Image (tube, grey):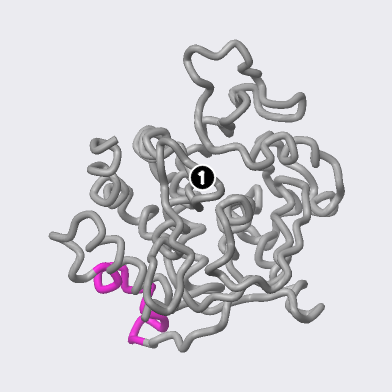
Amino acid sequence: MNSCSNFLVEEIINRRDFKATWNFKWFRCFIIPWSWTSRMISFYLFCLSFAAEAHAIPYSSFGYACENVLNYYAGMKHLRGDALKHKLSSVIARHHSLSYKELSSMKQVWDALKILDSADFDKPEASSEVIEIYSLRVVSKLLAGKPEGWNMNSSRGNKFYGECHVNTSNCRRPATRESASDTETDRERWAPPAQVRGDIARAIMYMAVCYGLNESGGGLNLHLSDSPSIVNREMGMLSTLLKWNEIDPPSREEKLRNDRICIKYQHNRNPFVDHPEYATLIWKQVVQRH
């Protein structure tokens, strides 16, 4: 049984870039809808998306299995669709977790976020600043936990990720006064800054792979769709996420973050950062069918 289906989600404090805090009180994963899952996407972006039951991490000559990228994705070359999705899920499920059960654990998580979200990716320990994802502003780490900017994230709420509908008259650009100039939103959709749209798309895809299996042991059965429904545990807009993944490929910073997740924190990888083409191989037929 896929270990993703056994995850318990603890209290998760959302990343400071969104300047908001959500508490998730130990819900079993098979009853977590996309409305909560979408709120965890930002937290994942800096590596600590899930506080979960720890699994033994297989060691190799590289230290952790995820450090040997070639072997990490072995056997996936000819896979497509659900077969590739299942294979990736079995690989990324093996990871270490950081939780908020203890005050010391909270400090560990925040310390990790300050490194992973540092304004200076080459020398994160020495940097005193972090970058906000919706506004792309550089702010002091001392301000990272302050309430400024909560309106920015609350304005997205449970809206799906996507660009304004072409026929809408209700598109707002930027999405809020605090957001970057190229953000936009309408009644159903929210588009983050262009330079992080691919990052967010790949984060959502990671979660759909890890939590998108409906197995006998119980799973979230989360899906990506172009007609998403929170009730049906669907996130979207799928075709837009695929486009963002293509036009905003992984940056050097995103790749470094993925490496640091592997080596220092969760000891797994986001496969869509290493292989953006996996997204098309898994979901292209889904888009074509609809």
Residue 190 on image: x %, y %? 59, 32
- Residue that appears at 77% across and 43% down: 139
Residue 123: name its quadrant.
bottom right
In the rendered view, would you say 167 is above or below 225? above
Q: Is residue 208 left or right of residue 261?
A: left
Residue 71 in magenta? Answer: yes
Residue 155 image position (x, y, % from top left):
72, 34
Viewer-nearest residue: 234 or 242: 234
Q: What residue is drawn where x is 26% and y is 59%?
A: 82
Mark 1, secondary structure of its residue:
helix
How many labels sit on residues?
1
Q: Quadrant of the N terminus?
A: bottom left
Residue drawn 51% across and 67% down?
Answer: 261
Residue 90 sits in quarter: bottom left
How crowded pointer 1 is (Cα within 10 Å; few <14, some 14-19, many 20+) is rated as: many
Say which residue label 1 marks.
200
Q: Find the magenta span and give its range.
A: 60-73
Query: Where's residue 286, x and y in %?
Result: 28, 43
Does 288 sit above or below residue 16?
above
Horizontal side, residue 222 vs residue 108: left or right: left
Viewer-proximal residue among 53 and 114: 53
Q: Quadrant of the C terminus?
A: top left
Q: Is 275 a magenta residue?
A: no
Please indicate, yes or no, whether residue 72 appears anywhere in the rendered image: yes
Question: Can residue 122 be seen in the rendering of this structure?
Answer: no
Give the residue type at disc 1.
Ile
